[in-house]
Each structure stands twice: as structure tokens, then as C-alpha cells.
Image: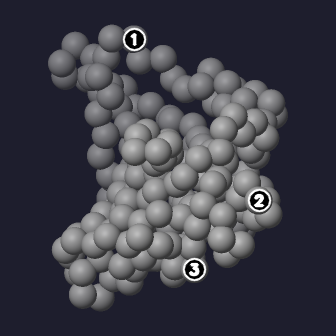
Amino acid sequence: MAAVPDNLAPYAYNIRTTRQTVAFDIQCTCGCASFGLLQNSRTEEEKRALEKYEQSKPRTGWHTLHGGIDQNGKPYLYIRKLFFFKKYIEWPAEPFFVKIKVVKAICESCKKEIILFDSRSNGCDPQEATEEEAAYEPYFENSISQYCGVSVKLEQPESEDIGSDHFSWIGIYKKDGNRKTIFFDEETD
């Protein structure tokens, strides 16, 4: 049976579970159930670093990229030329912040921030964060357009030894009366 993750358990109410999913609504410890939702975005400096990374990628033209792993366990990429010849390609490492996704809810009454999802620590198999990733402070544009109810749905793998903090999919919904709209949808495998 699926369960609410430990970091969200103090805020979960109206919990609905099935064999592999758990859905619940969020309520602040002050009793308020109205939140503003924010997802991290890029600073101007990060946008420039990302643009520089995109420009440093090799041009492959119309060729399809192929890949493999060499005898040393290092991945490699190549394109085929004239069906027989391989041209090996060096692919630059993407900036560390690209894969970091964070979603938080801010209580309308007391302004408490609740982290609903952080890709560095949540998911099916969260990787050990590097020192740089752990120290990274996500940037949020403080532009809450409306406050609303928040509902979370998680899909957890069927396994006895996996805890409630491990899930393979998360959906975060805005609730306005009986209407729900998706705010964040992510597979975490």
C-alpha cells in the first residue's frame, strides 16, 4: 500500500490510497489550505551558462547520434558517415543545475514555505548529490498569481523494501473549487 512521504506527512489530509498510488491535499500547520505554488527557474547567469552549453554542443547535421560504453565503462557517442565510418564526438557536460527541479508551496496566511518536490532528494532512486548540487540554492521568481488549494498524487513502485519517500511519478495540482489543473508533472525514475 502506498504511503505519504515523511516530509509531507505533517501537511497531508484527505489521504486516498490504492495499491500503488497515494493522493492527498495539503494543509499548513496553521490550518490554512490556500497556497501559492512556485517552481524554480533560471537566473540570468544560469541562462547564459545554458546558452553557452548549447552553443558548445557539436553539430551533427542530419546524422543520427549513436552511443555505447567502451571497455573502461566510459560512454561514447559517434555518427556514421557513408554507412561504414564512425566519427566519434566529444559531448560537453551539461551544467549541474539543469536537472534540479524544486516545487514549493507558500501558505497564504503565515507565508510558511513547504517543499513539495526536490529532485535532489525525492524520487524513485535519488542520486547522492554532489557538494555543488547540495549547496545550490534554487532561484524562484516571486510571482504568485493566485492562491489556491493544492493536491498531490504520487505513484510508488510495488516493493516491500522501498520507503514512502521513494516514488516514480509525482503530480501536483491546483484546486479551485471542484476544478483541478496540473501545475507540475514529473517522472522520477
Identify the element where label 3 is drawn.
helix
Q: Which residue matches tag 2?
A: 109
As shown in the figure, which amino acid type bears the numbered disc 3? Pro
121 shown above or below 187: below
Q: Is residue 59 left or right of residue 2?
A: right
Asked if residue 78 lies left or right of residue 54, the reply is: left
The tag earlier along the polypeptide, 3 or 1, is 3
Q: Where is the N terminus found, in terms of image quarters?
A: bottom left
Is 105 or 48 nearer to us in this picture? 105
User: Up-down: is 88 above or below 160?
Assistant: above
Rendered residue at 58%/67% (across/down):
27
Q: Position of residue 174 (x, y in %)?
A: 50, 45
Q: Amino acid at mark 1?
A: Gly
- Which residue in the protein does label 3 denote? 10
Give the amino acid type for the residue marked by disc 2 in the picture.
Answer: Ser
Asked which quadrant contains residue 123, the reply is: bottom left
Res 188 visible: no
Disc 3, disc 2: CB below 8 Å?
Answer: no
Q: Give the foreground label among 3 and 1.
A: 3
Callout 1: 10 Å neighbours few (<14), some, many (20+)?
A: few
Residue 61 marker: 1
Of callouts 3 and 2, the N-terminal one: 3
Quarter where residue 115 is shown: bottom right
Residue drawn at x 32%, y 28% as measured from the top left: 65
Q: Residue 110 at what x, y percent from top left?
A: 79, 63
Circle 3 Cα neighbour tier, 10 Å, few/some/many (<14 / 14–19 / ≥20): few
In depth, the one of 9 and 162 nearer the eye is 9
- For residue 108, side relative to residue 28 (left or right): right
Q: CA distance from mark 3 to mark 2?
A: 17 Å
Q: Residue at x 52, y 54 (%)?
A: 150
Q: Kindly report the distance in space between the C-alpha atoms of the residues bearing marks 3 and 1.
A: 52 Å
Q: What secondary structure is marked by label 1?
A: loop
